Amino acid sequence: MKLLFRSLGVVITAFLLFSPHSAQTVSSVENEIVRHLDNISKFGNYGGTSDDDKVYAENRELRKKLVRYGKRSDVLMYSFPKLKGKMQVSTSRDGNLRIYSWDEETGGTMHDHDSVFQYRGSNGKVFSWAVTDDESNQDVGAFYHDIFQLSTGKGTVYLAVSTFVASTSLAGQSIKVLRIQSNRLERDTKLIRTASGLQNSINFQYDFFSVVDRPERPVKLFTFNAARKEFKFPVVIEDEKTPQGRVTNNFITYRFNGTHFVKVN
């Protein structure tokens, strides 16, 4: 009988040690992420003490941990105040989708960013996925900074906005349709009707110096009107002065008609 209780005690102790309830607190998770980001800045190409092996290792560890911790509901609900200014953390209005983006600091004038997506499936379980785990993904290198949300007859649609820094002057922005279907993040939903057919995203490039005087960072060129169910972005003109594209005060607008986003002007 004593042996039985002793065995049960070992099982109970092991359960307590490895139970989800004994996992790291979200505050500890945040400190761990901050430590990796600080090391990336320390060993990256923009910090003065460049070390390729160390910065790549730190980026791998950060990506791995974000994917691992990203499966936790408490992490999805946490605001991560210490990450402000160190990492872009964008969360949908309903709290069911979040994107973490950071500068890997492995580039030069062209910046390489990585991103991890976190979302809540229809069964309430939380999932995570890294952009760089999908070799076919064309958004590698961009960072996400806005998630717009739209309710439709076929469920919620998210519009994720990203920026790609190609050089000191050349940049690009994109808006991409995402949906959570059952327990899967659908990343190729074609809901934008363009002249060339249905698309999953719209993007454009521009000369950063044509918007450098705008106060917000990152510069936000896509805007969304929830009441009108439409997004808009500026007309960009290429001329002799700005061959990479000058952002103008004119806009192109796409409105959701119940089935697709269609151009209205």
Image: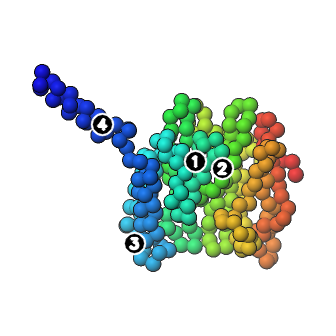
In the drawing, does residue 229 fall left or right of residue 205? right
Q: Secondary structure at mark 3?
A: loop
Q: CA distance from mark 2 to mark 1?
A: 8 Å
Q: Nearer the viewer, residue 110 or 14?
A: 14
State the residue at coordinates (83%, 58%).
Answer: 251
Q: Amino acid at mark 4?
A: Leu
Relative height, residue 7 to residue 204 (above, below): above
Residues 50 and 119: in front is 119
Q: Are marks 1 and 3 in contact (CB under 8 Å)?
A: no
Residue 90 visible in rendering: yes
Q: Are the residues tagged 4 and 3 within 8 Å (C-beta)?
A: no
Earlier residue among tags 4 and 1? 4
Task: Give the class, few, some or many, for how many residues have Cα within 10 Å of label 3's Cα (few <14, many ≥20).
Answer: some
Q: Earlier in the sequence, mark 3 or mark 2?
A: 3
Q: Nearer the viewer, mark 3 or mark 2?
A: 2
Q: Residue furthest top?
A: 1
Please give the label number shown on residue 16.
Answer: 4
Residue 44: quadrant of the picture: bottom left
Q: Which residue is mark 3?
A: 51
Q: Nearer the viewer, mark 4 or mark 1?
A: 4
Marks 4 and 1, how far apart at CA: 30 Å
Q: Which mark is residue 147?
A: 2
Q: Residue at x 12, y 21 (%)?
A: 1
Closer to the chain start, of discs 4 and 3, is 4
**Nearer the observer, disc 2 or disc 4?**
4
* Three-letter amino acid code of the residue under disc 2: Ile
Q: CA distance from mark 2 to mark 4?
A: 38 Å
